[in-house]
Image (cartoon, rainbow, N blue to C red):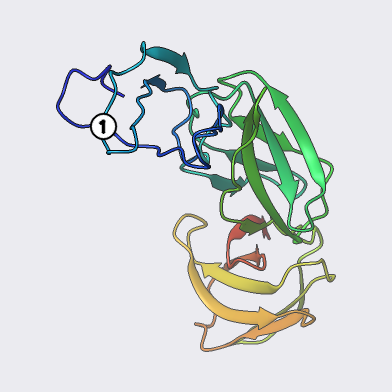
Amino acid sequence: NENFTQNHTTFVTITDNLIQLTTTVLGLFCDTTYYFRVWAYNEDGIEAKYSNVVSTLTLPGPPVVPTNFTVLAVSTYSIIWSWDITSGATYYQLFDALDTLIANLEGYGNTTYIETSLTPNTQYSRYVRAGNNYGLSPPTEIKSVYTLAVPPADLSIVNVSSYSVSLSWSLSNASTYWVYRSVDNVSYVSVSSIPHPGNTSTVSSLSSGTTYYFKLGVINGDGILSQEYSI
């Protein structure tokens, strides 16, 4: 493929008693110019002169697999999927783990998709492929993420003693609930972790005659804290 300017090339030998007039050369690279010439041998094994040189450009072929495929859960109902621009791509397709097409994104630089109308604290798995007129690239690895959990809106104090406070809340779809306390409503420390479906917590070892503030955080299936509700 150097137009025979160097003293080496790749040989394709034609046999079949010298009656074969065509051949197919396999294993070439896409979007590459190749040069070809033909020669023959007589019965004594003496080479004839080379034929004229012909050349052709192989077709571009599908793009390579997209790189840097990432995912971020941004709310209880939406996820951002993104990847790097892929050379030779004219569109991208996002699929779920069952190979169902989720989105078709036209354009070389259209490398971000915001998926909406999802279910809170639910795992979603996706992969992406780049495409052009010659086909689709191999798939990226599958990425999975949970949407954020919904915080309960009714954290309440159900009992107070000299040294403890009992809290309760309605269940949401969180995987875990974290209880935090503070004496100044600025700096909070976590005091308990309650797995779903727990919805109560008693915070003990408090100081009598002291005002305390509490808030509840919700954790999704990836262990990500979403929102907090305070009292």
Quarter of the image with the C terminus is bottom right
Crowding near the residue tagged with mark 1, few <14, some 14–19, many ≥20 C-alpha atoms within 10 Å: few
In this rendering, is residue 178 above or below 53?
below
Residue lying farthest front? 43
Q: Nearer the viewer, residue 77 or 216?
A: 77
Q: Position of residue 185 (x, y in %)?
A: 52, 57
Does any portion of residue 205 appear in the rendered image? yes
Q: Is residue 30 above or below residue 106?
A: below
Residue at figure coordinates x 74%, y 68% from the top left: 174
Residue in the image at 77% along x and 35% along y: 103
**Amino acid under label 1?**
Thr
Spot occupied by residue 146 in the image (x, y as percentages of width and height): 68, 59
**On screen, residue 115 above or below 147:** above
Q: Residue 131: where, in percent of width, then height?
A: 64, 30
Find residue 161 and report its horizontal and vertical position in percent: 66, 87
Q: Is residue 135 left or right of residue 70?
A: right
Q: Nearer the viewer, residue 131 or 146?
A: 131
- In the image, residue 90 sits, relative to residue 169, either above or below, namely above
Q: Residue 119's quadrant in the figure?
A: bottom right
User: On the rendered image, what quadrant is the N terminus found in?
Assistant: top left
Q: Can residue 159 be seen in the rendering of this structure?
A: no
Residue at 58 percent across and 47 percent down: it is 71
